[in-house]
């Protein structure tokens, strides 16, 4: 009988059943299916959405495990409610990561398998360091082995599997990139010395070569590999992706072009110099280089590229500022549209709001795409941290309660990410109090001054302190880096409760997005993007602070004034004055009047 609440449930059970037939023939008692691709990507081309295909859960993060008799899926707090709905009727157990009673993947396998059993992984989509950790834990604690399953299984099991993307790569203009490909390669070579670096992360490759593409939804990257030697560089991509102009550009920068399919065959042949392999490289790469590792000519070490990419140059910083102005104009026009629609009693749904916001952004110069699928959660949907409305879940907005709207855009000169929680009418006392606590946390982090040597974990408590005093918390990170017309999630720096050692340095962009989520009731999140800038030099060292990049009013109607301090109100008033000053010259008279009202002092 078809599961009425989850139409895909029966199909998922059939897919798992077919996978188990392959497992039995191969004498494998479990298969681990991660969310990533051969490049360690957070968001992946449709071709590699293996975990989504086998489980039916389409959140961006999660790991599925299928045994001969059971199945389970691990995901984080952003997706608990979504996963519960999408796994219903599939027979897959939901494992809520970081909760005290949730077993780790390896502990769960140890409880359902027996000594001498074997778990399988696809070596092309699992990282070397993760596979090593799993192998050590499974064998050391439970006597369970870890083996490689053929990648070809997925082509056979998934008859309609999407092909690899084939759209052409594009050159990011130097005035927007701010640094040439040749200069970036020179910096990388200086950092690694007389060695060869294997680069598989797609945003690292895009940044290094100043190339962009459309291969991953919302992430302007090109599916490819890059090998950098002291003398030359080698780029591996599908031939049809490389136009004559891109090929000429790469040749001018001493970058040879090879077919994507040749990478695994050739990777171990670059052995003139010692090989540096980032530990997040996939298992297939490390396996191909095993001979060099055994000979002491291949070492695992972090790539220098993420740290370089995280610190934006002057051109990138200026690009962010210009992109934020255009994004702010689009957001103001959307908010006016929404307010007028609601006042007239015309129907607006989560999806129609999403479409209108995207339309407004698309009219702005240099717009290329959204930077992630818009989170438009009204009422109870706002409590689902990464809720994305679908035709099945879409609901109309009513003149009461809160709309949580988390969205962003890809402009050629910058990537944006903003959340506003919008009151649509009368609110409950709890909604107003939660809104105010979130705003207080956002302001506290925004106002931070901190010395050189500070990491994001040390500042994370600033955003949570007011919630913690009320016994409230949120389980996601408070902030992440953002790429320059690249991935909206960029490391290595973050604001998180768990230790993140990457230092916060001038030139880094980072989001500030605390939230409160009450399942079945409402959700609140307020997010701005910030740039780390120099602050002052004192006898105690060098200090930094945050410059707010996002330009959009923060709704003041839900604020419980009694909970706000004079300093907090002063910060909010100063921020709103800046929003008005920077956006008003680009708006017509009626839009200026609306913005003046939304940014007036309180």
Image (cartoon, grey):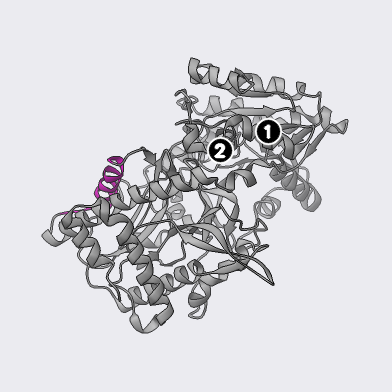
In screen coordinates, is 407 left or right of 23? left
What is the x, y in percent for residue 71? 57, 47
Q: Main secondary structure of the magenta part?
A: helix
Position above or below: 476 against 194: below
State yes or no: residue 110 in magenta.
no
Q: Quick check: can you spot residue 243? A: no
In the rendered image, residue 359 lying in the magenta stretch gets the answer yes
Residue at the limit of the structure toward the left, as seen here = 344
Which segment is the magenta one?
347-363
Question: As rendered, which of 318 and 155 lies closer to the eye?
Answer: 318
Residue 203, label in figure: 2
Instruction: Determine the residue located farthest toward the bottom in the rendered image.
Output: 562
- Residue 176 seen anywhere in this rendered image of the structure: yes
From this viewpoint, which residue is outermost toward the right? 295
Q: Which tag is nearer the camera, tag 2 or tag 1? A: 1
Q: Percent from the top left, x then y, of residue 221?
A: 50, 34
The local secondary structure at tag 2 comes to helix
Frontmost residue, 601 versus 431: 601
Q: Is residue 347 above or below residue 246?
A: below
Residue 49, given in percent of the width and then of the height, sits at 50, 36
| Residue at 24% from the left image edge and 61% from the top image edge | 595
Of the numbered discs 2 and 1, the one sitting upstream in the chain is 1
Quarter of image, res 10: top left
307 above or below 201?
below
Classify the position of the N terminus by image quarter.
top left
What residue sits 70% from the left and 48% below the top? 113
Marking on residue 436: none
Closer to us: 114 or 99: 99
Q: Give the residue at x 42% y 45%.
A: 372
Residue at the disc numbered 1: 186
Residue 284 location (% of width, % of height) = 69, 31
């Amino acid at each position: 009988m078809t599961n009425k609440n989850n139409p895909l449930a029966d199909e998922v059970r059939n897919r798992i059943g077919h996978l188990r037939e392959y497992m039995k023939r191969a004498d494998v008692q479990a298969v681990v299916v991660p969310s990533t691709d051969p490049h360690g990507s957070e968001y992946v081309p449709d071709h590699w959405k293996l975990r989504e295909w086998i489980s039916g859960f389409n959140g961006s993060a999660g790991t599925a495990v299928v045994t001969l008799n059971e199945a389970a899926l691990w995901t984080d707090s952003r997706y608990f409610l979504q996963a519960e709905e999408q796994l219903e009727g599939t027979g897959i157990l939901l494992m809520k990561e970081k909760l005290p009673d949730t077993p780790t993947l390896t502990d769960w396998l140890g409880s359902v398998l027996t000594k001498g059993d074997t778990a399988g992984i696809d070596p092309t989509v699992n990282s070397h360091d993760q596979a090593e950790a799993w192998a050590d834990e499974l064998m050391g604690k439970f006597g369970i082995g870890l083996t490689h399953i053929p990648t070809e299984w997925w082509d056979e099991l998934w008859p309609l599997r999407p092909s690899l993307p084939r759209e052409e790569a594009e050159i990011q203009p130097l005035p927007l990139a701010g640094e040439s490909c040749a200069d970036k390669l020179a910096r990388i070579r200086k950092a690694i010395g007389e060695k060869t670096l294997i680069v598989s992360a797609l945003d690292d490759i895009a940044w290094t070569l100043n190339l962009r593409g459309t291969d991953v939804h919302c992430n302007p990257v090109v599916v490819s590999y890059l090998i950098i030697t002291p003398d030359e560089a080698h780029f591996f991509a599908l031939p049809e992706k490389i136009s004559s102009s891109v090929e000429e550009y790469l040749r001018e920068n001493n970058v040879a072009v090879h077919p994507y399919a040749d990478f695994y065959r050739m990777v171990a042949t670059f052995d003139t110099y010692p090989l540096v392999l980032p530990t997040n490289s996939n298992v297939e790469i490390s396996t191909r280089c095993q001979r060099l590792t055994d000979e002491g000519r291949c070492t695992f070490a972090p790539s220098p590229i993420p740290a370089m990419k995280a610190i934006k140059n002057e051109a990138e910083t200026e690009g962010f500022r210009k992109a934020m102005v255009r994004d702010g104009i689009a957001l103001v026009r959307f908010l006016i549209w929404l307010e007028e629609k609601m006042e007239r009693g015309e129907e607006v749904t989560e999806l129609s709001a999403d479409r209108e916001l995207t339309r407004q952004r698309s009219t702005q110069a240099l717009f290329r795409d959204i930077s992630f699928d818009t989170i438009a959660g009204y009422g109870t949907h706002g409590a689902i941290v990464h809720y994305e409305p679908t035709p099945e879940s879409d609901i109309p907005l009513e003149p009461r309660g809160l709309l949580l709207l988390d969205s962003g855009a890809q402009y050629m000169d910058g990537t944006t990410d903003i959340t506003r929680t919008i009151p649509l009418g009368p609110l409950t006392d709890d909604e107003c109090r939660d809104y105010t606590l979130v705003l207080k946390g956002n302001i506290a982090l925004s106002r931070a001054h901190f010395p050189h040597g500070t990491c994001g974990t040390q500042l994370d408590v600033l955003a949570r302190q007011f919630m913690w005093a009320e016994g409230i918390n949120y389980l996601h990170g408070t902030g992440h880096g953002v790429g320059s017309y690249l991935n909206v999630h960029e490391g290595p720096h973050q604001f998180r409760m768990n230790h993140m050692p990457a230092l916060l340095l001038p030139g880094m962009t980072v989001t500030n997005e605390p939230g409160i989520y009450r399942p079945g009731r409402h959700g609140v999140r307020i997010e701005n993007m910030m740039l780390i800038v120099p602050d002052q030099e004192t006898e105690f060292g060098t200090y930094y602070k945050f410059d707010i990049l996002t330009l959009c009013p923060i709704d003041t109607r839900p604020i419980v004034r009694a909970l706000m301090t004079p300093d907090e109100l002063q910060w909010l008033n100063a921020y709103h004055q800046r929003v008005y000053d920077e956006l008003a010259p680009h708006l017509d008279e009626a839009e200026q009047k609306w913005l003046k009202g939304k940014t007036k002092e309180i």
